[in-house]
Image (tube, grey):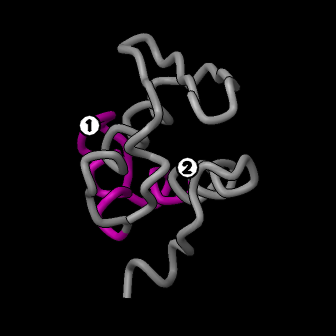
């Protein structure tokens, strides 16, 4: 698991603060949910089903949303695990 996730501060409203860089981000409800699950060390492979269940949407759509968000986190340097590697 990526240790930097544990250092992030995430408010209930989706405001994200990275104390190591001072950067702030505003997350939509889906992104905030996924990040909370990642911080809680939920397996990446289980995220689409968890998102689908929580937001009452199909798992395929949820999977695409999760994948896009993980890529965004990686691009920002907040997440360095490859989703394909973690799910195997």
Q: What mark, if any, has residue 65 been given in the picture? A: 2
Tell me if mark 2 has few (under 14), some (14-19) or many (20+) residues whose alpha carbon lies within 10 angstroms of its own: some
Query: Can I make out residue 52 in this image?
Result: no
| Relative to 12, 53 lies left or right | left
Secondary structure of the residue carrying tag 1 is helix
Label 2 secondary element: helix
Residue that badge 1 annotates: 54
* Residue at position x 44%, y 25% in the image: 9
Position of residue 24 relative to residue 81, above or below, is: above
- Residue 52 sits inside the magenta stretch: yes
Q: Using residue 84 as the reference point, say whether residue 86 is left or right of it.
A: left
The reply to whether residue 83 is in sight is yes
Identified at 35% across, 70% down, the residue is 45
Of the 4 image quadrants, the one containing the N terminus is bottom left
61 relative position to 36: left or right: right
In this picture, is 27 found above or below 37? Answer: above
Q: Is residue 37 positioned above or below 32 on the image?
A: below
The image shows residue 18 at horizontal and vertical percentages of 58, 30
> What's the residue at 36%, 50% (across, down)?
38
Q: Residues within 10 Å of mark 1 (few under 14, many from 20)?
A: few
Q: Looking at the picture, how far across and down is residue 21, in whole percent?
A: 69, 33
Residue 73 % position (x, y): 63, 49
Q: 29 and 35: which one is in front? A: 35
N-terminal of the pair, mark 1 or mark 2, is 1
In this rendering, the answer to whether 70 lies above or below 45 is above
Which range of residues does the magenta coloring cover? 45-64
> Would residue 18 be found to the left or right of residue 10 on screen?
right
Q: Residue furthest right?
A: 75
Q: Main secondary structure of the magenta part?
A: helix
């Amino acid at each position: 698991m990526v240790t930097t996730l544990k250092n992030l501060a995430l408010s209930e409203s989706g405001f994200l603060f990275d104390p190591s860089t001072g950067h702030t981000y505003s997350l939509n409800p889906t992104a905030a949910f996924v990040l909370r699950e990642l911080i809680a060390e939920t397996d990446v492979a289980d995220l689409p089903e968890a998102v689908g269940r929580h937001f009452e949407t199909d798992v395929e759509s949820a999977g695409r949303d999760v994948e896009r968000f993980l890529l965004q986190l990686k691009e920002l340097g907040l997440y360095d695990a490859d989703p394909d590697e973690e799910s195997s």
